[in-house]
Amino acid sequence: MTTSRIALVRQPSTRLADGIVTHIERIPVDVDLARRQHDAYVGALAGAGWDVRQVTPADDCPDSVFIEDTVVVLGSLAIVTRPGAPERRAEVAGTEATLTQLGLTIERIVSPGTLDGGDVIVSNSTVYVGRSGRTNADGVRQLRDIAGRYGYRVVAVPVDRVLHLKSAITALPDGTFVTWSDLVDTRLFPHVRTVPEESGAHVVALGDADVLIAASAPRSAAMIADLGYRTIVVDIGEYEKLEGCVTCLNVLISQ
């Protein structure tokens, strides 16, 4: 059976520089450079064999390029989120329209729940969800109820030192988790490895051998390559000024 591999992305808004900053000081963003970096990022996804689909831009939403926060994908199920920042909720409709076109089953997080996709890590049949400043307890409860109906177990993880769970920890293709410092309680995760740079804890598994990682983490990239992976390095420096990671800029759908 042929497996389709689709990557959803969204072009950065002309208002990108006005994006929300929570845990770091604001630094000016070069929007033109950010667009070039995004083009290279999209090219890296395509080069790794993913069919890149552009979701309709949301130019009035400065953070809309961070498309990951609008949906959680579990196989053929798409759980449309309700972002924790009210000004980001207008981003969701465009993502849902594309998911509907792709034929995915749609479920939704509804008020009073809030959930950002950046707080969710899927590892086999386990879903880790950060209880963060953007994802509230009711959002966790709704995710647990929905995912449970489809055979997934949900583990809640307290997050208070960074924006999202994926700001602190992510997973390699073999299920090993990578993290930096003590930003999250690693006792909740199996097989944890520490990387030497904070941004090295942000990886995207693009397949059995391919791992996407930021150019700001060269030592981490070398460490991961030494484990037998092909590291695909992208410069997302302008997005890192807005607490963005390599994970934030895509939604991967593999069926």
Image: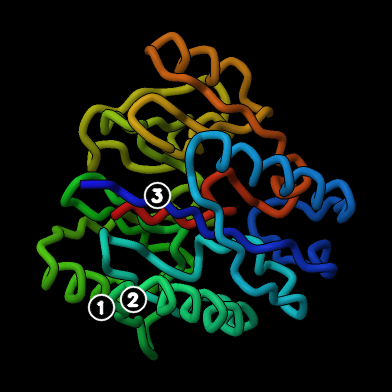
Q: Could you tell me residue 3's position as x and y percent?
A: 29, 48
Q: Which residue is mark 1?
A: 142
- Name the amino acid type tagged 3: Arg
The first of marks 1 and 3 along the sequence is 3
Q: Which residue is mark 2?
A: 139
Q: Which mark is residue 5?
A: 3
In three-dimensional space, the C-alpha distance between marks 2 and 1, rounded to whole angstroms, equals 5 Å
| Residue 210 locus on image (x, y percent) | 44, 28
Front residue of this view, candidates 220 and 58: 58
Residue 237: % across, % down: 75, 40
Q: Are marks 2 and 1 in contact (CB under 8 Å)?
A: yes
Q: Amino acid at mark 1?
A: Gln
Q: Residues within 10 Å of mark 1 (few under 14, many from 20)?
A: some
Instruction: Point out the tag, 2 or 3, that comes first from the N-terminus.
Output: 3
Q: Residue furthest front?
A: 1
Amino acid at the residue labelled 2: Gly
Secondary structure, mark 1, is: helix
Q: Position of residue 54 (x, y in %)?
A: 61, 63
Classed neighbour count for the residue bearing mark 2: other residues with Cα under 10 Å, few (<14), some (14–19), many (≥20): many
Q: Is residue 146 above or below residue 179?
A: below
Residue shown at the point (27%, 69%) measured from the top left: 77
Identify which residue is drawn at 59% across, 78% down.
Answer: 91
